[in-house]
Amino acid sequence: MAIANRKQREKEEMRTLILDAARSLFLEKGYENTSIRAIAENIEYSPGTIYLYYKDKDEIFHALHEEGFRRMLEKMQPLEHVQDPFERLKAMGAVYLDFAENNRDFYDLMFIIQVPVSHEENPDDWQMGHNTLDYLKKIIGECQQQGRFQGRNINYMAFAIWSMVHGMSALYCRDRCKAFHFENMESKELMDNGYKQFVAMLEKL
């Protein structure tokens, strides 16, 4: 049993090593310009070793994408204990912004750099992303049950809310907030205050 546990641990450590190297290279060179050979050279193993764990770089990218969403959903799980759905919605946006701020690399891979086409053509391969979107729609539906957002389509509301918060996150992750700096305001302070303005608009709907 001890040998089996050790082998499993070694496999997990190798997967982590591969994913860490791939994440760095995808962000530095882009998906198209990153090869299995480059990933192997980065961790000082042969390309054949990589293929023992992942069939191609598309599968590696997908694994990173799923890991990012898993981490984000873990941050959002405690929100289930917030009874008021509108308060939960506001908290979800704040958690999203915090995730982007503290996980720029994963956020970039999840939402910004171009993704492999083959997985986009198969929605089932992006289940973690769908789970996150479904969670947002669920909260919006609960808000409607309590009288908010009446007469508004849940799908459009989810798209509008996600787009707004994603826009702030993308600007922050790509250091574009500097274009909006005024009164010596730092990027995080700009995001925080911008989100408060967005929430104020939601409260009027």
Image (tube, rainbow, N blue to C red):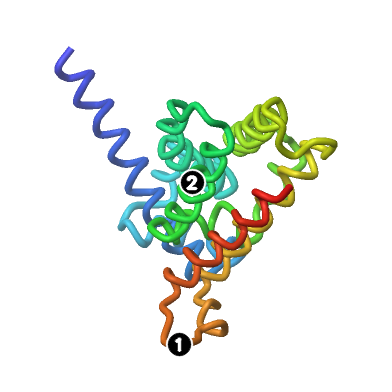
Q: Residue lying farthest left?
A: 2
Viewer-proximal residue, 57 or 105? 105
Tag shown at residue 74: none
Point out the tag, 2 or 1, that comes first from the N-terminus: 2
Q: Residue 124's spot in the image, x, y percent? A: 68, 30
The one of 164 and 114 positioned closer to us in this rendering: 164
- Residue 64's label in the rendered image is 2
At a point 62% along the width and 59% down the height, the residue shown is: 198
Return the x and y of residue 147 as percentages of the image width and height: 72, 31
Q: Secondary structure at mark 1?
A: loop
* Residue farthest along the top direction in this orientation: 1
Quadrant showing the N terminus: top left
Measured along the vertical axis of the image, is residue 179 above or below residue 97?
A: below
Left/right of residue 168 with respect to residue 83 in the rendered view: right
- In this view, 186 is above or below 89: below
Of the residues tagged 2 and 1, which is closer to the observer? Answer: 1
Disc 1: which residue: 183
Q: Would you say 153 lies left or right of 92 here?
A: right
- Badge 2 crowding class, 10 Å Cα cut-off, few under 14, some 14 to 19, many 20 or more, is some
Mark 1: amino acid: Glu
Name the residue: 31% across, 34% down: 12
Residue drawn at the location 24% of the way across and 30% of the way down: 9
Q: Residue 177's spot in the image, x, y percent? A: 53, 77
Apparent side of residue 150 relative to residue 185 in the rendered image (left or right): right
Q: Nearer the viewer, residue 92 or 134?
A: 92
